[in-house]
Amino acid sequence: MKKSELKSFLDEKVHIYNHPNFIETDPIQIPHLFTLKEDIEIAGFLVATIAWGNRKSIIKNGNRLMEIMGNSPFDFVMNFSERDSESLSPFVHRTFNSEDLFYFLQALQNIYKNHGGLEKVFARHSEKDSMQTAIHHFKKTFFQLPHLPRTQKHISDPLKNSAAKRLNMFLRWMVRNDHAGVDFGIWKSISPSQLSCPLDVHSGNVARKLKLLNRKQNDGKALAELDNSLRKLDPIDPIKYDFALFGLGVFERF
């Protein structure tokens, strides 16, 4: 396909999948339970953290997480203490267990009480056309408190060549205002033009078939290559094509 044909093809797929119906089968439905900015942020961050594996399982455990937090994530985080640890003990999603969750809640409390909240921490080191350095610095802030070494694996570091799929997905949720009611657009200090596509098996395979990506591994270098391709199609909102790549891969078996 020529560039103009490819853009038209992908724009059509964005129009199909960047639609409220998308929410029904996607983990983004969990933060959509809330209206308070901080509730949306915290629910989105925690659900994005466990967003690997079977989507039904992710959604089920995302709802379980919200129940544990009394369906008031921000209030729960701000008042969280050692005495609440017992209520976390049944929770596990694959390798993310109650010990990890305990630290994540402590770290979120630290971020809201001492660093101005999630948006400020991510925005602080954002660059003109990338959030990858910002994600690296976010991880450093997140793990300021004493923690088990094993818990660090649940936050990716792009500067160690990770594609950081789940954090890039979380940023898409918070930053993009798609006017379709899927992504939230509640973070105004970061622009959609700075975002990167959540690169996974599905989006990676489709991107290679469409010649948007040549690198075989789904790593940080591949993400940079895909970013470059998508920015040529739409420099203002390149990450909208996540809907096209994901939809083609998951729903159309492209």
Image: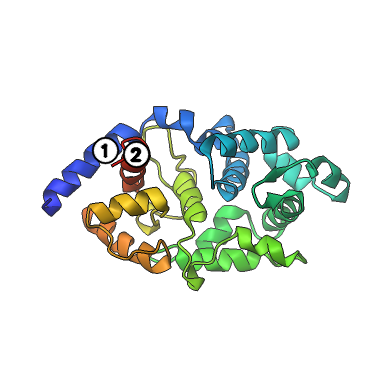
Q: Is residue 2 above or below residue 219?
A: above
Does residue 208 appear left or right of residue 150 in this picture?
Answer: left
Q: What is the spatial separation of the Cα atoms under label 2 and label 1, in whole angstroms?
A: 7 Å
Residue 115 placement (x, y as % from top left)? 65, 60
Tag 2: residue type? Gly
Q: As drawn, is 160 to the left or to the right of 36?
A: left
Rate crowding at label 1 as few (under 14), some (14 to 19) or many (20 or more) other CA atoms within 10 Å: many
The residue beneath circle 2 is 247
- Tell me, yes or no, if residue 125 can be seen here: no
Q: Amino acid at mark 1?
A: Lys
x and y percent of residue 1 in the render?
A: 12, 50
**How many C-alpha atoms fall within 10 Å of the one at disc 2: few (<14), some, or many (≥20)?**
many
- Residue drawn at point x = 26 percent, y = 38 percent: 13
Q: Which residue is mark 1?
A: 13
Q: Position of residue 28 (x, y in %)?
A: 51, 38
Q: Is residue 43 visible?
A: yes
Residue closer to the observer: 65 or 188: 65
Q: Which residue is located at x 60 percent, y 36 percent?
A: 36
Location of residue 248 by image quarter: top left
Q: Is residue 227 above or below residue 140?
A: above
The mark nearer the N terminus, 2 or 1, is 1
Residue at 86% over, 51% down: 82
Mark 2 falls on what kind of element? helix
The reply to whether callout 2 and callout 1 are in contact (CB within 8 Å) is yes
- Decide which of 251, 66 is in the foreground and name it: 251
The structure residue drawn at horizontal position 76% and vertical position 52%, both measured from the top left corner, is: 102
Vertical position of residue 44 compared to residue 113: above or below: above
Tell which of 230 and 181 is nearer to you. Answer: 230
Q: Quadrant of the C terminus?
A: top left
